[in-house]
Amino acid sequence: MQYVAPILFVITVIVWLLFAIRSRRLNDLQRTISQLPEQDRIRAIQTELGKATSGKSAKDWIAQQKKLRFYAQIGISVVLLIAALYIILSTSFSPSEKHWLMGRSVRSSDFG
């Protein structure tokens, strides 16, 4: 159990890096397609990313994808952080300290 929290930290860093790479790709695509005529922008997105824009303009679709990735990144990071904190707190305290953390009084019968 002692290696789980560092592993979760590494996973969090990897997730952030993957999202950063994807966000960079969207930014580069947005810069590139801004030079194209409007009717060619959606086709460029479909060619580059292999995804349909579902009836939205290219600019709106890219903005939506950026927001979606940002919120997903924050959500995944929060879940991993909570899991790491839970593991750290559950493994690094003695039984009497755990009772104190949980807001319960400690009785001698709790230990034996």
Image (cartoon, rainbow, N blue to C red):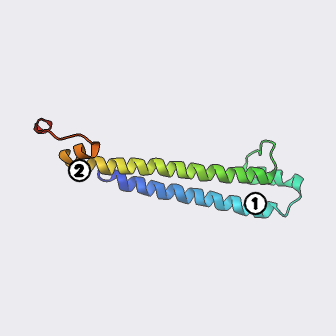
Residue at disc 2, secondary structure: loop
Q: Residues within 10 Å of mark 1 (few under 14, many from 20)?
A: some
Are the residues at dot 1 and dot 2 in contact (C-beta closer than 8 Å)? Answer: no
Query: Image point 86% across, 60% down: which residue?
Result: 36
Query: Image point 53% across, 48% down: which residue?
Result: 75
Residue situated in front as seen by the camera: 22 or 87: 87
Q: How many marks?
A: 2
- Circle on res. 93: 2
Dot 1 or dot 2: first in sequence order is 1
* Left or right, 69 with reference to 106: right
Residue 102 point in image, percent of width and height: 28, 42
Calculate the distance from the C-alpha at mark 1 to the C-alpha at mark 2: 50 Å
Looking at the rendered structure, the kind of residue marked 1 is: Gln
Residue situated in front as seen by the camera: 102 or 30: 102
Residue 67 point in image, percent of width and height: 65, 52
Q: Is 24 drawn above or below residue 99 in the view shown?
A: below
Query: Image point 57% across, 48% down: which residue?
Result: 72
Tell us which disc is closer to us: 1 or 2. Answer: 2
> In what quadrant of the picture does the C terminus appear?
top left
- Circle on res. 30: 1
Query: Image point 36% across, 51% down: which residue?
Result: 85
Looking at the rendered structure, the kind of residue marked 2 is: Phe
- Circle on res. 38: none
* Left or right, 82 with reference to 1: right
Q: Residues within 10 Å of mark 2 (few under 14, many from 20)?
A: few
Residue situated in front as seen by the camera: 29 or 105: 105
Residue 55 point in image, percent of width and height: 81, 42
Residue 81 point in image, percent of width and height: 43, 51
Residue at disc 1, secondary structure: helix
* Left or right, 109 with reference to 14: left
